[in-house]
Image (tube, rainbow, N blue to C red):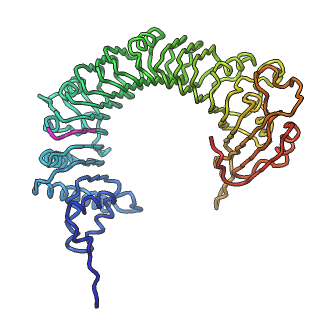
Amino acid sequence: MEYKIDRISELPDPILDHILSFIPIKQILQLSILSKRWQNVWTLLTIPEFVQYQFTNNLRKVTPEEIQGKKQGFKSFVERYLLGHYRQRLSINKFRLNMMLDDESDCALLNRWIDYLVECNVKELNLHVWMNRKIYEFPKNCFELPERVFVAKSITELKLSGCCKLNSFYNDINLPSLKKLVLDSFVENQVVQALIDGCRNLEEMILECCYGLKSIQVSGLSKLMAIELLQNSELESVEIEASNLESLVFKLTRPCQINLGQCESLNKLLLYSCSITDKWLHDVLSKHPLIDCLYLRGCNLLKMIKISSHCMKSLAFIDCSELVEVDIVTPNLHRLEYDGDFISFSLNTSSISEVSLAFSDYDFSDVEKIEFLANLSHPKLLNWQTFTAENVINIAKESRENLPSPLYSVKQLKLKAYSLSTRQIQELVDTLLWICPLLEILFIEWQYEEAIDNISFTFTEKKEDNISFKFSYENPIDNLEDPSCCKLIPILCWRHCLKTIKIENSRGSIEEDTLKKYFFDNAEILESFHYLKGSVSLKV
């Protein structure tokens, strides 16, 4: 019998290591039965990920003893891997552990694993641990991270989440190689401050849901480029001074005093649910003129915003409920996002390419609605989100002859309606082609409910449908008199120059004849009409 040579097994360990790094751990373990060569090669992996539920999530109707057996197998697996590296003095680049601790012996086991990792010069350490509900008493029974982690010279990235606890007994914290710090755990305020002060080369810091964090001061970190403070429920005050800081994100759950010092490189500022005033925002933007991305969401103390910036490229105002006036002078703005009421809105820019809109209330006069839309500086692309199509259909429905089409320069429009009847499509298209009278692409997406029959009952499931329109134009017919439909805008609308139209409807739910009649009745020089059912390719 002629045997084939197993050339993969003959590869050097570094090459096998690289190959196995792309394969899930469970499949690597299955390879160990192939030959003696594969039995131990998995222990040489330098980028491991150990997730306990991957060993137990397929269990169905098993006994508590079987579950414990699976957990013990997981612990033995991790122990064997780390001990192998420790004994051979092999480095570990990255280690991620997701595990439940059942008792004190598990805490001792995790402490031993951390000792192995520090001795193996681990670079990226990611620990997500949680406690068994039978022994869990927050924060008393949290896992207390050993002090030696905070003097490890090799660690470049440290992520701690779940029931990890940082205590005040740590003495000299010194992580000279740490570049990224992510905390989502129970902390003591002075420990976090000491941790920040002891990481002089820190480049990125994310503190999320850190129970016990009440204040934070950042200064003297010359390499720090990004900070995210997210949903820290006890946070009361923040002071930041970082000369090379580029990105700053706040997501707060309570009033918090924010003091930004010299952050002259700051270009991205995202504020969620922050109790900031008009004056605070004005002062911050004045002191940090390089900000090119500003995102405001749920900042309900803001009332009148004035922004003047040559660097600003992206702006967002989302759910700022008390906002009544916005005045923007940003000649280089590319993208604007707005979700709120039809307020006094002034936008002075020459380069905007995309606007995204959602209105919380449509109970405003036609003049207010059209004035708002007309002040958007005529973007090329408009994304519009509405709860019901009726909200859009009714815009200036009775007064269009006396009001100008507000967005006559928009070329592409995408509308998403959560509630729309297929019988409304023609009327909706008519409204959108009045608002944007020379569109090249129109894409409409909506949700519908479909009945699903089960063996014993019927339920409804929300699904999506969509329709797209592609329009092409040519010069209008000769001797065209002044048309009444577009007398208030500087261009001729689609009715006088639409030559071809291509429609694609993903489910074929819209009647072709209805749309065909509408366009041929209203477009004076229309020559070609194509309607296709199936997948939509003309997406905005």
**Residue nearer the viewer, 373 or 270:** 373
Quarter in which the C terminus is drawn:
top right
Quarter in which the N terminus is drawn:
bottom left
Q: Quadrant of residue 338?
A: top right
Q: Is residue 325 above or below residue 230?
A: above
As drawn, which residue projects farthest toward the bottom?
A: 1
* 301 falls in the magenta region: no
Q: Main secondary structure of the magenta part?
A: loop
Left or right: 244 as drawn, with respect to 43: right
Q: Quadrant of residue 238?
A: top left
Left or right: 140 as drawn, with respect to 170: right
Taking the spot 30% from the left edge, 43% from the top edge, the residue there is 128
Residue 357, position as x, y percentages in the image:
61, 28
Residue 251, position as x, y percentages in the image:
42, 26
* 155 falls in the magenta region: yes
Taking the spot 32% from the left edge, 14% from the top edge, the residue there is 261
**Residue nearer the viewer, 283 or 116:** 283
Taking the spot 87% from the left edge, 23% from the top edge, the residue there is 482
Left or right: 538 as drawn, with respect to 46: right
Q: Is residue 225 above or below residue 118?
A: above
Q: Is residue 119 above or below residue 416?
A: below
As drawn, which residue projects farthest toward the top?
A: 279
Q: Quadrant of residue 244?
A: top left
Taking the spot 66% from the left edge, 35% from the top edge, the residue there is 412
Q: Which residues are magenta?
A: 152-159
